[in-house]
Image (tube, rainbow, N blue to C red):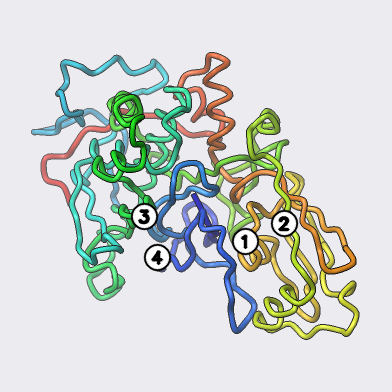
C-alpha cells in the first residue's frame, strides 16, 4: 500500500473531489518542478498487500445530500449477500446496530490498466479489496476489519461522485466512482491476479479472504449516519495513530489519536534509507529549493506531531511537510529522524504509511489478543457506529 493524501475542511464542510495523483503505498520518489503540494483530496488506489498507506479509492468528496441513514429497510431493500447467499452468513456482532440502506448497489471502477470501467457487486469488491490491501496470513478478524474499512470508503466515494452534477465530474474517470489498477494489485485484486500472486498458497489464502469478506461486505462504518473516509495504513509510528489534520488540511472527528504502541512488534516497523548529497541536491532543487554550499544546512526538522510524525522540514530555502519529503525520497513514513553522514543523510524511519485511521499491523495484533473486527474498528475510528448494509431497491 502506498502514497500520500490531503483532506479539506472539517466534517460537515464540503470536500472537493480531485483525482489522486499519488498512490498511497507507492514509496516511489516524486520528482517535481515545484515543492510538492499536499493533495487536496484523499488519493485513489492502494497497492500490493502490506505495502504502506492504504487508503481507499478516489478523491475525498462531499457526501451526497440526503444520503441514506440508519433505518429499517423499505420496499425491496435486501441485505448484501456473499457468493453462497444468506444461508451461509454468520451472525453479526451486537455492536452492529440497525441497518444502513445503501443507494449504491454496485461500484463502478475505472481500471487504470485497461482503461475500461468495470462494475462490481459490494460483496465482490470487498473480497477483492481485502486481497489487495492486507496479507491473507493476517488474523481473520483483522481481514474483516480491513474489508469493512475498504468498503466503507468506497461507498462514501461512490455516493459523493454520483451526487455531483455531470459537469463537475472528472471526465478522466469515464463515469466511474474511482480508479484502481487491479492488474498491479492497486485498489483491488481479482481472483485471477490473486491466483498468480499467491501461487501454491492460493487456495488457503483465497478461502480466508472469502470468509472474511462474507462478514465485511455486510457492514459499514458511519459517523452521523454517513459512511466515513476510512483511512488505513500498514504500521503506525509506534505510540498512537495520527490525526487527520496533521496529514491533510482539515480535521475529521473519527481520525484522531488511537493507541497502537504494539505496532513496534510488527516486522518492518523500522527502516533506514541513506541518500548521498548528490542525490538529495537533485531532488531538492527539482522541488524548487535553493541550497547553500554546505550540505549540512540542507535539511532540518522543524516540527513534529504528538504521534511522532514530522509535520515541517526546512529544505534549503523551502519548507516542506514531512509527507512531502517522504514522497520525494520514498520513505516508508514521515516518522523519521535525520543523521548527517560524511556523504549525505541517513533517515531512520518508524512505521509504514501516513499513520491515520486503522493500523493494519495493529489490527492483526489486537485480533490475536482476542478482539473481534467490530472492536478493532471502534478502537481505531473514534465515535463511529457500525450498521448492516442493505441494498436500496432503486440505487443511484
In the picture of the structure, the residue carrying the numbered disc 2 is 273
Q: Secondary structure at mark 1?
A: loop
Q: Residue 146: image x %, image y %?
A: 43, 35
Crowding at mark 3 (Cα within 10 Å: few <14, some 14-19, many 20+): some
Q: Quadrant of residue 250?
A: bottom right
Taking the image as shown, residue 103 lies to the left or right of residue 336, namely left
Q: Residue 97: image x %, image y %?
A: 36, 23
Q: Secondary structure at mark 3?
A: helix
The disc at residue 330 is 1
In the picture of the structure, the residue carrying the numbered disc 4 is 17
Q: Which callout, 2 or 3, points at the residue further toward the start of the chain?
A: 3
Q: Secondary structure at mark 4?
A: loop
Q: Which callout, 3 or 1, points at the residue further toward the start of the chain?
A: 3
Q: CA distance from mark 4 to mark 1?
A: 25 Å
Q: Are marks 1 and 2 in contact (CB under 8 Å)?
A: yes
- Mark 4 or 3: in front is 3
Amino acid at each position: 500500500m502506498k502514497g500520500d493524501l490531503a483532506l479539506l475542511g472539517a466534517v460537515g464542510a464540503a470536500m472537493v473531489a480531485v483525482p489522486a495523483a499519488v498512490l498511497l503505498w507507492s514509496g516511489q520518489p516524486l520528482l517535481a518542478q515545484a515543492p510538492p503540494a499536499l493533495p487536496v483530496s484523499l488519493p485513489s488506489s492502494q497497492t500490493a498487500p502490506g505495502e504502506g498507506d492504504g487508503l481507499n479509492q478516489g478523491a475525498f468528496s462531499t457526501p451526497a445530500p440526503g444520503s441514506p441513514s440508519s433505518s429499517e429497510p423499505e420496499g425491496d431493500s435486501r441485505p448484501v449477500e456473499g457468493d453462497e447467499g444468506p444461508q451461509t452468513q454468520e451472525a453479526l456482532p451486537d455492536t452492529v446496530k440497525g441497518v444502513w440502506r445503501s443507494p449504491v448497489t454496485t461500484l463502478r471502477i475505472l481500471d487504470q490498466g485497461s482503461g475500461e470501467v468495470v462494475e462490481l457487486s459490494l460483496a465482490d469488491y470487498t473480497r477483492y479489496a481485502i486481497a489487495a490491501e492486507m496479507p491473507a496470513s493476517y488474523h481473520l478478524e483483522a481481514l474483516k476489519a480491513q474489508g469493512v474499512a475498504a468498503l466503507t470508503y468506497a461507498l462514501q466515494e461512490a455516493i459523493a461522485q454520483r451526487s455531483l452534477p455531470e459537469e463537475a465530474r472528472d471526465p478522466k474517470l469515464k463515469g466511474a466512482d474511482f480508479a484502481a489498477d487491479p492488474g498491479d494489485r492497486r485498489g483491488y485484486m481479482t481472483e485471477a491476479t490473486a491466483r498468480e500472486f499467491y501461487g501454491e498458497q492460493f487456495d488457503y489464502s483465497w478461502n480466508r479472504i472469502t470468509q472474511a469478506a462474507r462478514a465485511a461486505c455486510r457492514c459499514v462504518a458511519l459517523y452521523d449516519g454517513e459512511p466515513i473516509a476510512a483511512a488505513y495504513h500498514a504500521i503506525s509510528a509506534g505510540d498512537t495513530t495520527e490525526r487527520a489534520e496533521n496529514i491533510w488540511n482539515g480535521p475529521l472527528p473519527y481520525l484522531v489519536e488511537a493507541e497502537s504502541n504494539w505496532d513496534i512488534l510488527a516486522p518492518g516497523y523500522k527502516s533506514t534509507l541513506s541518500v548521498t548529497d548528490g542525490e538529495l541536491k537533485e531532488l531538492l532543487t527539482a522541488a524548487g529549493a535553493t541550497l547553500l554550499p554546505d550540505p549540512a544546512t540542507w535539511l532540518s526538522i522543524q516540527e513534529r506531531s504528538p504521534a511522532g510524525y514530522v509535520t515541517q522540514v526546512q529544505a534549503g530555502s523551502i519548507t516542506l511537510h514531512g509527507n512531502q519529503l517522504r514522497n520525494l525520497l520514498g520513505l516508508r513514513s514521515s516518522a523519521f529522524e535525520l543523521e548527517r553522514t560524511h556523504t549525505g543523510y541517513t533517515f531512520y524511519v518508524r512505521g509504514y504509511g501516513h499513520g491515520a485511521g486503522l493500523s493494519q499491523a495493529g489490527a492483526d495484533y489486537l485480533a490475536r489478543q482476542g478482539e473481534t473486527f467490530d472492536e478493532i474498528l471502534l478502537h481505531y475510528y473514534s465515535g463511529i457506529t457500525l450498521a448492516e448494509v442493505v441494498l436500496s431497491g432503486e440505487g443511484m
